[in-house]
Image: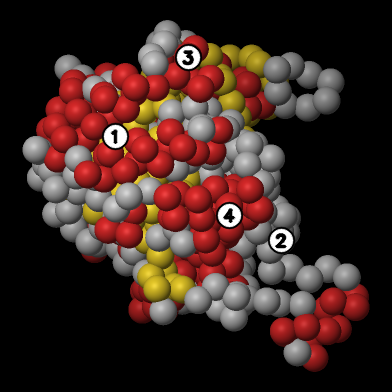
Amino acid sequence: MKTIKIFDTTLRDGEQSPGCSMNLQEKIEVAMQLEKLKVDIIEAGFAIASPGDFVSVKAIAETIKDSCVASLSRALKADIDRSYEAIKNAAAPRIHTFIATSPIHMQYKLQMKPEDVLEQSVAMVKYAKSLCADIEFSAEDASRSDPEFLYKILGAVIKAGATCINVPDTVGYSTPEEYYEFILGIKNNTPGIEKVDLSVHCHNDLGLAVANSLAALRAGATQVECTINGIGERAGNAALEEIVMAINTRRDLYQYKTNIDTKQIYNASRLLSSITGVSVQPNKAVVGGNAFAHEAGIHQHGVLANKETYEIMTPESIGLSQNTLVLGKHSGKHAFVDRLKALGYTLDESRLQYCFEKFKELADRKKDVSDLDLRALVEFDKLDIPAEYVCDTFVINSGNKMTATAVVKIIRGDEIREEASTGDGPVDAAFNAIEKCVGISFTLEDYIVRSVTAGKDAQGEVVVKLDKDGRKARGHGLSTDIVEASVKAYIDAINRYCYEIELEG
Ligand code: KIV
Ligand code: ZN
């Protein structure tokens, strides 16, 4: 059975989409989860895009051992140099270089003639090859390019040393039948194509990214580019979890496999949405909250009689346990560690101790602590940056016929500051009082509240996105009390903002 390579671009194409930007620590965390997922290639970023991008691609390249690490570069010397500088210490480095090949892109974006695009591509692939053995070449907007021109340019870059050829459906314009024929055309007409990987990269503008990717695999593509939860430019990229589970579930149809550890899919999806604050829609295939829920009576009856009546894959296969009530306040550390292991988490001792203490606090407030509560705790309650500001106490007064007021006491080192403020509701009043304490005022760009489980004692997850003069900061908070979760999230965002400023000196 042929093995299809999974090229993950969550940290590049995904990260560049609105609301999905991540800081260095968050990118490293996602990269480590992608390594656990066993993706073949991690596209860590676009090294020349900014100094921050360079630092994160480099840090990922130096952290990841089991996956190849790639950096994107235009077909320009400066880009390729920057990429190479960032990935040269990786266990398996790859330079990914691209140039547009469609008439519309060449004329209006590049303002270049096709023969100049060809010449530059060959020169840049040769140059990249002089630095690094593994070179991917992408013909941007390939699906709208003249096929004869594509065969020529792809053949030439293979001769120049490319090891992987990628033919993206950049604007999500293709359909499965068309893309299938397109890939067959490339396979049958490109000199040397049998010596390299043929990769596909589909965008989801018409909701066809996964279908197009699968059609391409049937036509002979050997690598597929995708992102966790399908995040990416505009309507997103093909979703990794959907492609992998389609291949696994329809082994009868697709005679190939991937190296992906599917039991890490759910954790990867959760981690990404908790970091970015962008949650997946409930009916999202594979990882949506309702993907394994059976609501209709007839369906429930069928599933009880035989799960396969309505379930084509098991929740366990993506690492989603069906255990609902697990731990309570009498549960010990062993049971806690066992449950975390079953959920796919391995924490170092200090993080484990921290999470265990948080679990005990939660179990005091909430009778039953479910798997979803535990996941939220591990993912949301983080100790990854120094907490410059800590909330000591807060008191809120609010009601339907009064102005909400908040008094917040915040500790910073040896200093204690207490401030009162009013606001448009309890959360706004608390945020205003916090800002008075820290002496900085932010624009609140986004405020997201989500309940972790059902029930009146459910924990609320809060994500806030703040902006101060163009600098963004995101914070998370978790509590059975949503005002407390909001206060925690606001202070977390402020701490992250201060930490980033301090890092920059
Ligand atoms: O969509 C696209 O064409 C891309 C390339 C740069 C690979 O993201
Ligand atoms: Zn793309």
Query: Do the numbered discs 4 and 2 sit on residues whose CB atoms are within 8 Å?
Result: no
Whether residue 332 can be seen here: no
Residue visible at 83% across and 68% down? 295
What residue does disc 1 label?
A: 97
Q: Of the residues shown, which amino acid type is indicated by label 2?
A: Asn
| Mark 1 or 4, nearer chain start | 1
Disc 4/disc 3 C-alpha distance (Å): 27 Å
Task: Rate crowding at label 3 as few (under 14), some (14 to 19) or many (20 or more) other CA atoms within 10 Å.
Answer: some
What residue does disc 2 label?
A: 290
Query: Do the numbered discs 3 and 1 sit on residues whose CB atoms are within 8 Å?
Result: no
Number of labelled discs?
Answer: 4
- Depth check, mark 3 against mark 1: the one in front is 3
Query: Do the numbered discs 1 and 4 sit on residues whose CB atoms are within 8 Å?
Result: no
Residue 349 to residue 422: above or below: below
| Mark 4 or 2, nearer chain start | 4
Residue visible at 68% across and 63% down? 291
The colour scheme used to paint the residues is secondary structure
What residue does disc 4 label?
A: 180
Q: Is residue 240 left or right of residue 37?
A: right
Q: Where residue 178 sits in the image (x, y, percent)?
A: 63, 48
What residue does disc 3 label?
A: 107
Q: Of the residues shown, which amino acid type is indicated by label 4?
A: Tyr
Query: Do the numbered discs 2 and 1 sit on residues whose CB atoms are within 8 Å?
Result: no
Disc 4/disc 2 C-alpha distance (Å): 31 Å
Q: Of the residues shown, which amino acid type is indicated by label 1?
A: Thr
Residue 106 to residue 309: above or below: above
* Secondary structure at numbered mark 1: strand
